[in-house]
Image (cartoon, helix red, strand yellow):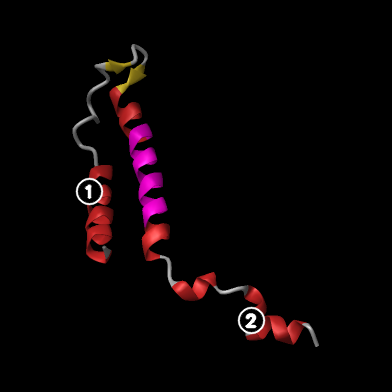
């Protein structure tokens, strides 16, 4: 799963470089939105979904431990 997510991150990064819609104001999506703006809106949703997948499948286990077990929190209690 690690390699699939890494490949997906690289693919999403490459999709961010949208050279194909820079000079096109037409066609209008939904009759009012330039295609480049629509592309970036969909791209933001894709990035959000990717972040959800990264957190779900790649989040390190030590970050899930409660903060009370850390040495710093014990020093504050003195």
Which is more toward the observer, 23 or 77?
77
Res. 41 image quadrant? top left
Which residue is labeled 1 in the image? 14
Mark 1 neighbour density, 10 Å: few (under 14) some (14–19) many (20 or more): few
- Magenta residue span: 41-53
Which residue is labeled 2 in the image? 69
**Does residue 65 sit above or below 38 in this rendering?**
below
Residue at 70 percent of width and 80 percent of height? 73
Q: Is residue 66 found left or right of 28 in the rendered image?
A: right
Give the structural element (helix, strand or loop) at label 1. Answer: helix
Count of numbered circles on the image:
2
Mark 2 and mark 1: Cα distance apart in space: 41 Å
**Does residue 22 sit above or below 53 in this rendering?**
above
Residue 47 drawn in magenta: yes
Residue at 34 percent of width and 27 percent of height? 38
Res. 66 image quadrant? bottom right
Q: Is residue 69 found left or right of 77 in the rendered image?
A: left
Residue at 33 percent of width and 39 percent of height? 43
Q: Main secondary structure of the magenta part?
A: helix
Percent of width and height locating residue 12: 27, 48
Q: Is residue 66 found left or right of 10 in the rendered image?
A: right
Q: Is residue 40 found left or right of 66 in the rendered image?
A: left
Task: Give the farthest residue toward the left.
Answer: 20
Residue 64 drawn in magenta: no
Res. 21 image quadrant? top left
Residue at 42 percent of width and 59 percent of height? 55
Q: Label for residue 68?
A: none
Of mark 2 and mark 1, the one earlier in the sequence is 1
**Does residue 51 sit above or below 70 in this rendering?**
above
Percent of width and height locating residue 34: 32, 21
């Amino acid at each position: 799963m690690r390699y699939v997510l890494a490949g997906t991150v690289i693919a999403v990064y490459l999709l961010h470089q949208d050279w194909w819609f820079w000079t096109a104001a037409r066609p209008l999506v939904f009759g009012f939105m330039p295609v480049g703006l629509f592309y970036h809106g969909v791209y933001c949703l894709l990035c959000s979904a990717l972040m959800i997948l990264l957190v779900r499948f790649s989040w390190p286990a030590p970050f899930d431990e409660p903060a009370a077990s850390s040495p710093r929190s014990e020093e504050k209690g003195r």
